Amino acid sequence: MVERVILTGFEPFGPYEYNPVYDTTLKLHRQNFEGLEIYGLILPPSYYEASELLFEKIKEFSPRIVLGTGLSSSINKIRFESYGHNKMNGKYSDKMGRKPNNEEIITDGEIFYKTNVDNIILAHHLDDINIPTEVSVNADYYICNSLIYLTSRNIQREDLQLKFAFFHTPWTDSYTKLIDIPPEKKIIPQEMLETAIRETFIKIREN
């Protein structure tokens, strides 16, 4: 029996015309591997609407695993994010036109919520198959952080029996001929990103 899992990626945001997690999520939608079927869910780059849409799909499908992905052009490797902090801040407006300045996501809410997977195990696994990986405790305060915070909050408050992980990725080599990526930015192979996604799902299921 094939088990459905959810993969999320964001639409392009800010000044970016492309987003590797958007295209990768579409590409992997409905892909089957190792007894899993990916449901690829594209999220709006919005502080609240992204988590609302994801939670709707969680209630609809009751998946055992959700993996969120986001682009961070400043990192040098796949980066698992452990915490979502109760803060919104970013140099770009979100899709709804919000541009908060160090505001709380939830007024008087918890300072942070933690994802409920062992990111150290996940990072070691990807490193072992030659995918450079790191673990972070600060996802910055833009839209990805908001998704981590609100999704982890919903899982805890609703006592949902699912595992939720999130990682950022650098640009992939699919975009080198489409946009001018500054030479100091890290670029990873597109296949590496896709393998990281599949292997993360498999390792979460094992644990």
Image: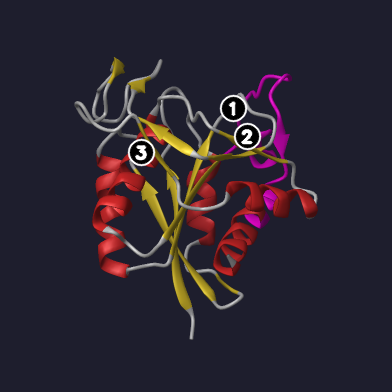
Which residue is situated farthest in the bottom direction here? Answer: 1
Q: Which residue is mark 1?
A: 73
Asked if the stretch drawn in magenta spans residue 87, the answer is no
Give me the disc on residue 187.
none
Nearer to the camera, 179 or 11 = 11
Callout 3 crowding tier (Cα within 10 Å): few <14, some 14–19, many ≥20: many
Q: State whether residue 68 is above or below residue 84.
A: below
The answer to whether the residues at label 2 and label 1 have Cβ atoms under 8 Å apart is yes
Q: To which quarter of the image does residue 20 belong? A: top right
Q: CA distance from mark 2 to mark 1?
A: 5 Å
First of labels 1, 3 by sequence position: 1
First of labels 2, 1 by sequence position: 1
Please state the horizontal and vertical placement of residue 90, each as a whole percent of the image: 39, 19
Callout 1 crowding tier (Cα within 10 Å): few <14, some 14–19, many ≥20: some
Amino acid residing under circle 3:
Tyr
Q: Which residue is mark 2?
A: 170
Nearer to the camera, 27 or 156 = 156
Amino acid residing under circle 2:
Pro
Nearer to the camera, 192 or 119 = 119
Q: Which residue is mark 3?
A: 149
Tell me the residue at 41%/30% (across/down).
13
Q: Which residues are magenta?
A: 168-195
Asked if the stretch drawn in magenta spans residue 172, the answer is yes
First of labels 3, 2 by sequence position: 3
